[in-house]
Image: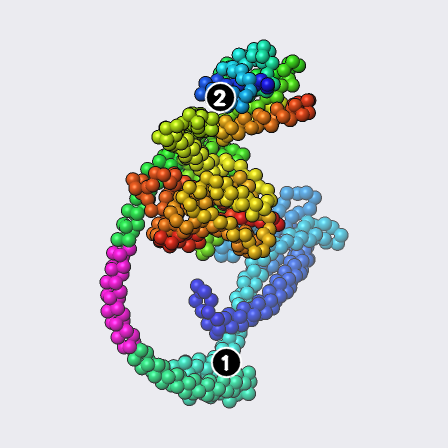
Amino acid sequence: MSKILIIEDDPLMRRMYQKIFTFEKYSVVMAANGEDGLVKVKSQKPNLILLDIMMPKMNGLQVLAKLKSDPDTKKIPVIVLTNLAGKQDAETAMAKGAVKYIIKSEHDPKAVAKMVKQILAGYTRDKVPASK
Amino acid sequence: MEQKGKKPKSLLLQLSMMVIFTCTLVLGGFGIYEYLTESKELEKDLEESVVMAADRLAIGLRTPLYSFYESGIKDVVLAEMSNPVVMNIIVREPWGSKLEYVYSRSEVGGEVMTVEKFETKLDYLKASQKIIQDGEDLGEVEILMSKEQIKTHLRKLIFTIFIQILVVDGILVTLFLLLLFSRVIQPITHFKNTAKEITKGDLEQTVKIKSKDEIGELAQVFNEMVSKLKNSYGQLEIQVKEKTSELQQRLGQLSNTKIAMMNLLDDAKELEGDLKKEKEGVEKKVEDRTKELRQEQAKLTSSIENLPVGFMMINLKMELVVFNVAAGTILGKVEEKNLVAELSKILGKKVDLNDYVHGCGVGKKRLMIDNLNQGTRILRVLLSPILVGEEEKACIGVVVLIEDVTELKVLERSRDEFFSIASHELRTPLTAIRGNADMIIDHYSDQLTNPELKEMVDDIYESSVRLIDIVNDFLNVGRLEQGRLEFKLESFNIMELVDQAVKQYQVTGSRRKLYLNLEKPKVKLPLVYADKDKVRQVLINLIGNSIKFTEKGGVSVSFAMEGNLVKVLVSDTGRGISIENQKLLFHKFQQAGSSLHTRDATKGTGLGLYINKLLLEGMGGKIGLVKSEVDKGSIFAFTLPTVG
């Protein structure tokens, strides 16, 4: 069973994603901010991380940088969550090693779950994550 | 002959003087010669006579002296003294004895007396002779003779010569004058008189001299001259007569002309009066117009002055011609002379003001330069060339409008920010509503046994979807209007895209039992060059609109070629759009046939067609209403560019 870490400060979104991934039979771990997220990555060792960019304390880009600089975590695929205004940041995140970005308001939870599934399938198939 | 300031000298007198002078000179010469010869001869005679008298005395006195016979001496002496020329006779005894006999004649009366010594004032000649008797010296005699007689004689001679000259002169002059008078003076006088007569106009006069000398010739020539003069004068007179009659004729004409002129002048005066009246009228009009113009100018000036916008007019020499207070204030309280320089500085590298003015607008285009920073403020400058003359060929300068758009920019930014924030902040909770509603429907439908509850959950989902669409519309309009929406142009098959969209609708839009057809084109369509997502958006919006306004029948999509463009037509059998409402289509917030209060709330924001228009324009296409009939349906169509 794949484990997904959701790092998202908005509880509404966090819970929504938690629900869909639970429905889809994933094990879900949640973090309300970047710092908490980094701790959970270390302790929970998720298969995939959903990372929001606009967060207080430590933003998604900083978290991403930390993840990619740590050999223990740099192979974990990261999907960046953002709103419409953060498209620029999302592209920066892609350049820094995120595998995909998702504009939250444009996709139903179902669609998000589908994307995650595809990415995990790719990773399991190739074994080596293409961190780009 | 006449000499300035001198009396005319008579020719006669002059000639006489000359004759007298010549005769006197000649006769005088002779006279002097005669006088000199005579005086020499007389002196010589006197000298001879005194020597002879001395000799005589010496001989005559021998005897009386020898015998000392005194009276005998006296007798001899007196005899000699009978010659009146003899003045003194002195007889001296020899051997140095003192005995001397001095006889002297008195100068007055001529009486002879014996004197001890004699004195004389007269000029005299002297001679002496020794008295010798048989070799015995008896003494000496001295005799003095006066020259007075010679002098007297010479004086007489001079007088005679003078008289001679006088007489000869007189005779010669008389003769000369007689000759001159008869031969020269008389004819000249005659000439003079005749000339005088001719001068007076009597051309019949002639000179009557027949002599054969020069005067005669002169007379002949003179007469010829006069006769010629007479002829010329006659001709002249004829000419003068002719001229005079001509002149009289002219004078007559002139007098006629003058009368005509006078008449004309009278007319002119009348005309002048009329003109004056008219001129006064025109002047009044000009005055009125000037007043009006002044008022207009005053209005214009005060308008310019009261503009909230800075106004400057710069001529081709980069000189400030007109400006208002606002110009100085907006540019930062700049003095008049520095306004142009300050403007140039603010424009900086965006526009070279100097180049713009000299190029007179570079192609004579208006130029708006936005976002110019002046300290903490933001300025907008509008440059516009002033074109005058036919076809606006001549450029006389540049008008500059300067606007402080700081507040406008702040407002714009806040509006944008509001839209952006509002939209984003709205979207997150909406996404949660939609997502959760969707999940309830998907995963808990078995628990929604109560149909009312199911309907409520469905409505929540529908509402969230519609809200998200509205928010998206707002965001899209904002971006499209600001040109911030990116178009990812690519070539693709439009048929496939339409097919996909139609299929998507057949799923969601089939509740009202409407048909949705795709009429495949008869010919193969070329690939279009556009943004796939945006075309899909337009297509879905158009199909959606058609479905929304159609109760029965359905919607069909067809294709056509229009030149190089591919045309996509969406036809429906809906309610149609009235003609007056047709012109409201494609405008912002216009939903055909609706005001703000009556608009159909279920039919969206009214931004759909407006967004379609902006999207298609962004891709080089066009959208329009092909035709529409109330209660029968509408046909919308859009075009897209093709590859190549």
The mark found on residue A19 in the picture is 2
Task: Say which element carries label 2.
Answer: helix
The mark found on residue A119 in the picture is none
Query: Can you give x and y, in whole percent of width and height, for residue A4 in the image?
Result: 56, 19
Same chain, marks 2 and 1?
no
Circle 1 packing at 10 Å, graded few (<14), some (14-19), many (20+), is some
Give above or below for B15 relative to B364: below
Which one is in front, B194 or B452? B452
Residue bearing mark 1 = B184
Which residue shows up at 66% across the image and 54% down it?
A: B127
Q: Which residues are magenta?
A: B258-286
Which residue shows up at 37% across the image and 43% down it?
A: B590
Which one is in front, B94 or B301? B301
Three-letter residue code for mark 2: Lys
Three-letter residue code for mark 1: Val
Magenta-drawn stretch contains B276: yes
